Structures are given as C-alpha cells and as structure tokens.
Amino acid sequence: MTYILAHDLGTSGNKATLFSDGGELIASCTVSYSTNYFNRVWAEQDPHDWWNAVCQSTQQLISKSKIDPSQIGVVSLSGQMMGVTCIDRQGNPLRPSIIYCDQRSEKEASDILSRISMPDAYKIIGHRVAAVYPLAKLLWVKNNEPEIFKKTFKTICAKDYINFRLTGVIATDYSDASGTNAFDLIKKNWSQTMLNAAGIDEEFFPDVFPSTHILGEITSEAAKLTGLKSGTAVCCGGGDGTCATVGVGSVRPGAAYHYLGSSGWIGLTTEQPILDAKMRTMTWAHCVPEYYHPSGSVQTAGAAYNWLKEQICEAESIEAKKRNENVYQLMNELLLQSPAGANGLIFLPYLLGERSPRWNPNARGAFIGLTLTSRRCDMIRSVMEGITFNFAIIVDIFREHIPIDAMTVIGGGAKGRVWLQLMADIFCTKIQRPNFIEEATSIGAAIVGGVGTKIFKNFNVIEQFLKTEETILPNPENEKIYKKIRPLFDKAYYSLEELFDDLRNI
C-alpha cells in the first residue's frame, strides 16, 4: 500500500495527515504555533515555527500510524496564502512573515493604484489591489525596512518555505502566485504591468509551476529532522483555499462550498474567472490546472465568534469547564432562546478590517440596536447572524453568474448544526455537511500530490474520500424574516462607513 502525507500549514498550527491510496484517513497530528498581533492591523509569524511544527507533526504521525516511511509515496502541502516571507539566497528568513490578515501596507497599495487603475489591475490579476496582498506588503518592506529588502533574494508563501526546507528548491504554484497581486491570471506568469506599478523587480518572485508539479525530493537533512525517507517525492502543492476547493469536491464547474474557520470564504469552480463589476470578489488559479477558483474571503468569521466567547460569554466558559462540555454548545443553546433577527439587534463582524465584500481596512465591528431589553442570547445570535449576512452578500454576487442551490460547508464552524441552519435560512439554499469537515484542505493537498505522482488518475478520485452526511433545508419562516433584515445589515454598514474612517487614528 502507498500512503500520501499531506501538511496543512494553517493560521494556528500545522496538521499532518496520512491518507492511503484508497482514500482512507489513517491518522493525523497537529502542532500549534503562535501569531503576533500588534499595532491593531499587524500580524506576523515566525517561519521557524512552521518548520518545527512540520518536523514534530511528521515524527508524531509516523510514530502514531506505525508505518514504514518508505511507504509514503509523496509529501504534499497546502498553506496559508497571501503572506510575505523574505528569504536570503540560502533560504534563511530575514524577518517574521507578514501573514495574510496583516493590513499595514495600505499606503503602499495606494501608491500602486496611483500608477494603475483598480479596474485595469483587476482584469489582470482577478483581485483588487489591496494591503492584504504580498505585492503591497513587499513594497512596505522596501519602504520601511530597506536593509531587509536589500538582503531579500525571494519572497515566498508559507508552504513554499516548507517545500524549500524539504527539498532545497525555491518555487511556488499557480494558486499561491495568483494571490500575490503580481500574477497574470490568464497568462499564468508574473505580470510586468503590476510589477512596474509597484516598482518591484520580477527577480524577487520565485519560479511558478502547476500545483501538481513534483518539485523535488526529501533531502538527507530534512529526512533526519522529519523521520521521512530521503528521496521521497515532494509535490508543489497549493494555497489552503484552493486545496480546500479540491478537498470539498469542487473539482468541476458549478460546485459551491463555504469554508468557515477563523477567517472564511465562499468558493466555487469555474472554467473562466468571475470578474465582478464592483470588484467585490476575487478569482484564483485552481489546483485543477484547467479551472479557476472564484471566491469571496472575509477577515473574521469564526474569529469573531471566538471574540464573543472570550469577551462576553465568560459565564458560559466557566460553566462549560464545570460540566466538561464545549463552551460553543452552551452558547448555541443560549442563542436558540433568541428569535430569528435577534430582537432587532444587528452585528457588524468587521473586527480586523474587511476583505470582500467591503474591501475596507478601516471597517470596525459594531452592535446596532441595543436596548435595555437586549439579552446576552440576542447578542450571541446577532453575532452569528452578522457573520452569515456578510457571507450571504458574496453568495448573491456569485448567483449573478451561476445558480447556487446547494452548498457544502467545511471548517470548524461546520461542527454545530445551529450555524448550519442559519446558513440555510440566510443563504436560501440547502446546506450539506460532508463526512470530513476539518480535513478538506488536507484531503485536497493529498489528492494534488496523488495526481502529481500518478497515484491517482485524476481529480475525480475525491469521490473515494467524501460523502454527504447531513443535508439541512431552509426554514421558510426564518427565510422571510432574514430577507427583511438583510437590507438593514447593509444599511448599518454604509451608515457607519465614514465614521470608521474617522476612528482610524483614535
């Protein structure tokens, strides 16, 4: 039997997962690492922490599964996207990685847009020019840390750094490249137009390959540190969003899904990019070479609900510890004491600025409609509704291009049926929960590696991995209520938009 080792290099840790060539999940191990959030919109991680997590999780996985490392046919990675990891010629990180949610480079994004219009850029890259993307972040390094920039050989994404540590090869794939603001989505090469607008030379970016490209082999040094066998194939892999697209079964045009984790997105597979007239969504290169992956990504999804738990639901946290229960289950029970619409309370979930659909780094979170009769159960429900209203805007954008009558939900947020029902009611579509809700990214990376090494014939092999375990239909009464409230959610945001700008320096 041949095994596939997939690494999912996420925001909070690395998950190593072992799959058989028959689609069976053998074992998984996770090693966490920290994120340094500071200056309100800055966020950094240490690349050495990623590598240590990969080494530790690999060793633990081999020990846990009791397999012979020589049976592993390929190692394939997915990783958090849109980060800037500056490395020297030896591949050493020169500073902490500026990760995807960091928005310090707003001025640099504006500088780029002084040389190219937003619509012209959007047509090339399939994304807005914005502070969250690596092109503006690298320009920030050039402007603010010139000594670091001078020493920089390449800027790479998270999974690319691990691939380098495993193989000694510096490269990236189409999916991660398409999230840099510097990549021509149609031509699939670095865009000289975008690079000129930023004043950045192409030499700072690595070679680009399809996700299924076999990048190299495990070096002897990497073998000693990970427990893998020297010479094992390493696949280029893909960004976490595009790997999840494969892992949730969206490998053919039209299939829609929702990832709900700390951040989240609505995604689907298409034959051509979706270019929204208002540029609210983005399109990535797919891990399936001939397709594209349009999506709309938000900054704080589950993270906003976690904020609620930490700051407002302390009593539930204490009670959950006493009962040895999950605090989110207690919060969901309390939520159900509030009716659809949360008794007129609206929550704006913009706790770290916002990507789509607002594209406003100055956006803030807010409760609107609080009265003396408002209860904690209303606040809990309004937070969950507000997050879901925000995603619904993205769903409606894509419905202008293709029908969406079903959506598969994955990620930690898919564990609770309460939230799934809210999605069905607010999205007005049936919601499907698959057998794997937190392994989709790993499954996708495994399939990419399996196709790359010919272990799998094609991407349709996903059918061996996935099945729908539950389908949730909309509640007609709640649908009616939410259709009335959704315009108020938009109105609340636009009413405060100018105030958010005023609060920027306070």
Image (cartoon, helix red, strand yellow):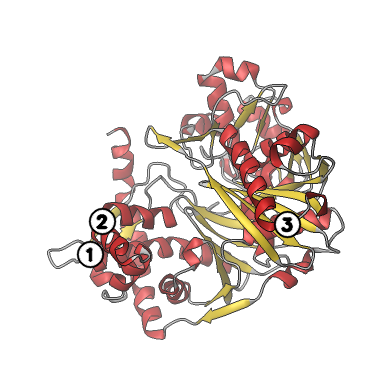
Q: Residue at x 36, y 66 (%)?
A: 325
Please report whichever mark, 1 or 2, sits nearer to the chain's N-terminal start: 2
Q: Does dot 3 land on a helix, a strand or a loop? A: helix
Q: Mark 3 Cα within 10 Å, few/some/many (few <14, many 20+)?
A: many
Q: Which amino acid type is shown beneath numbered disc 2? A: Ile
Q: Position of residue 167 (x, y in %)?
A: 78, 36
Q: Position of residue 256 (x, y in %)?
A: 61, 68
Please report whichever mark, 2 or 3, sits nearer to the chain's N-terminal start: 2
Q: Residue at x 27, y 34 (%)?
A: 506
Q: Which amino acid type is shown beneath numbered disc 3? A: Ala
Q: Position of residue 66 (x, y in %)?
A: 71, 56
Q: Is residue 91 visible?
A: yes
Q: Dot 3 corresponds to which residue?
A: 446
Q: Residue at x 27, y 62 (%)?
A: 316
Spatial CA distance of label 1 from label 3 is 43 Å
Spatial CA distance of label 1 from label 2 is 8 Å
Q: Dot 2 corresponds to which residue?
A: 312
Q: Which amino acid type is shown beneath numbered disc 1? A: Arg
Q: Residue furthest left?
A: 372
Circles 1, 2 touching at the beta carbon (< 8 Å): yes
Q: Dot 1 corresponds to which residue?
A: 376
Front position in the image: 29 or 121: 29
Q: Give the quarter of the figure containing the N terminus.
A: bottom right
Q: Judge depth for marks 1 and 3 and give the one in front.
A: 3
Q: Does dot 1 land on a helix, a strand or a loop? A: helix
Front position in the image: 378 or 104: 378
Q: Residue furthest bottom?
A: 476
Instruction: Judge whether 148 appears above or below 360 on screen.
Output: above
Front position in the image: 281 or 437: 437
Q: Mark 1 Cα within 10 Å, few/some/many (few <14, many 20+)?
A: some
Please report whichever mark, 1 or 3, sits nearer to the chain's N-terminal start: 1
Q: Quadrant of residue 55?
A: top right
